[in-house]
Image: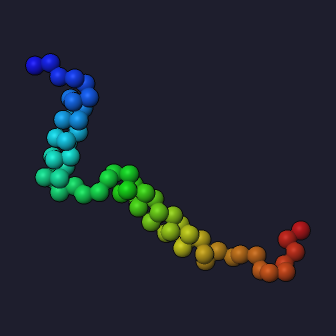
């Protein structure tokens, strides 16, 4: 059967979405990656807050 490329792509995308939904996948991989990176950045920021920071009025020359 000959199928136009646009129709084939749309059908494959729908099948992939249906398979992911059936497997329990929710959200997008990009959203998950961003959430992981934000959590990692927050942990890094928390780790660095204990470091000695310059005090106000201190001349660092």
Residue drawn 77% across and 80% down? Answer: 55
Quarter of the figure with the N terminus: top left
Which residue ends up furthest to the bottom in the rendered image?
Answer: 56
The front one of 39 and 49 is 39
> Residue 6's x, y, as percent?
26, 29
Residue visible at 38% across and 56% down? Answer: 31
Residues 12 and 59: in front is 12
* Corner quadrant of residue 39: bottom left
Q: Is residue 6 above or below residue 25?
A: above
Colour scheme employed for the rendering of this structure = rainbow
56 relative to 17, above or below: below
Q: In the figure, is residue 58 to the left or right of 15?
A: right
Q: How many marks?
A: 0
The image position of residue 57, as x and y in percent, is 85, 80
Quadrant the C terminus occupies:
bottom right
Q: Is residue 3 left or right of residue 59?
A: left
Q: Hey, which residue is sitting farthest left in the picture?
A: 1
Q: Residue at x 36, y 57 (%)?
A: 32
Locate residue 16, reporting x and y percent: 20, 42
> Where residue 58 sits in the image (x, y, percent)?
84, 78
In the depicted structure, whether residue 5 falls above or below residue 40:
above
Residue sitting at the far top: 2
> Closest to the observer: 23 or 40?
23
Residue 60, by quadrant, is bottom right
Task: Determine whether, in the image, residue 44 is placed left or right of residue 51.
Answer: left
Name above or below for residue 3 compared with residue 44: above
Q: Residue at x 64, y 74 (%)?
A: 51
């Amino acid at each position: 059967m000959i199928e136009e490329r646009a129709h084939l792509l749309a059908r494959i995308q729908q099948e992939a979405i249906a398979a992911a939904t059936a497997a329990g996948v929710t959200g997008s991989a990009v959203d998950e990656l961003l959430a992981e990176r934000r959590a990692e950045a927050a942990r890094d920021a928390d780790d660095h807050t204990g470091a000695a920071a310059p005090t106000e009025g201190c001349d660092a020359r």
